Image (spheres, rainbow, N blue to C red):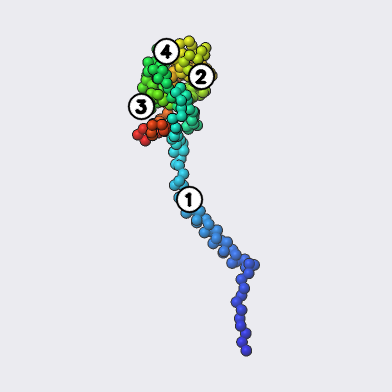
């Protein structure tokens, strides 16, 4: 008479088996995560790109004549102003009291080193930060009657912090604390009404 031999049952109480199952599962999970890191990293911007700041696209068709749109680029306010023909004419003939009428000491791309300091005369793009101590100037149109800018004011910008005044192309007037004209950021047009701030035309 024979007796069947039953296989030994494996129970959850078997500590050695549980140890190896958990270890293998953990190793597989770590391997999967490690393998995915290069793929995830490939979608992230580089450290240099993050430091420089990506270009910002701006629609300009909704800016009325004489109006301004402000966007943020690299943590700075950037103005986009649609100048009227009168505003363009006022900056094409530099005022004799400008400190740097040719923008020789100012920060702007070479393609904006002209009388209007712009790619298109009717669209002015500038960093809206005073070059003195970093305050924010305000737009003061011609004929505003603002006593801080004088009776013959042709339009431009006034910094209320320390009294610096800039013409409609962001050029500072003499005897003012701001040392240079307003900064003009890199920019170009990717279409009739689409402006890219932070990229040069050849980029």
Q: Secondary structure under badge 3?
A: helix
Q: Which residue is mark 2?
A: 159
C-alpha span from label 2 to label 4: 17 Å
Q: Residue furthest top?
A: 151
Residue 197 against residue 148 in the figure, above or below = below
User: Where's residue 84, x and y in %?
Assistant: 42, 21
Nearer-N-terminus badge (3/4): 4
C-alpha span from label 2 to label 3: 26 Å
C-alpha span from label 4 to label 1: 59 Å
Please state which of residues 117 and 67 is positioned toward the viewer in this rendering: 67
Nearer-N-terminus badge (4/1): 1
Task: Indicate which disc residue 37 carries.
Answer: 1
Tally of numbered tags = 4
Crowd rating for badge 3 (residues with CA inside 10 Å; few <14, some 14–19, many 20+): some
Q: Which residue is mark 4?
A: 97
Residue 16 horizontal side relative to residue 142, left or right: right
Nearer-N-terminus badge (1/2): 1
């Amino acid at each position: 008479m024979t007796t069947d031999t039953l296989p030994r049952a494996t129970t959850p109480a078997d500590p050695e088996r549980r140890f190896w199952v958990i270890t293998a599962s953990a190793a597989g999970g770590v391997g999967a995560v490690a393998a995915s890191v290069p793929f995830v990293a490939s979608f992230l911007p580089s450290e240099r790109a993050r430091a420089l700041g990506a270009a910002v696209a701006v629609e300009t068709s909704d800016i009325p004549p004489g109006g301004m749109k402000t966007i943020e680029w690299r943590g700075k306010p950037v103005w986009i102003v649609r100048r009227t023909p009168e505003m363009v004419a006022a900056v094409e003939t530099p005022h004799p009291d400008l400190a740097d009428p040719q923008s020789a000491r100012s920060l702007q791309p070479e393609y904006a080193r002209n009388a209007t300091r712009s790619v298109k005369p009717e669209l002015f793009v500038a960093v809206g930060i005073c070059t003195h101590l970093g305050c924010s100037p305000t737009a003061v149109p011609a004929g505003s009657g603002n006593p801080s800018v004088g009776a013959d004011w042709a339009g431009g910008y006034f910094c209320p912090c320390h009294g610096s005044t800039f013409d409609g192309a962001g050029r500072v007037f003499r005897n003012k604390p701001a040392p240079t004209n307003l900064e003009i950021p890199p920019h170009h047009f990717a279409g009739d009404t689409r402006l890219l701030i932070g990229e040069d035309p050849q980029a």
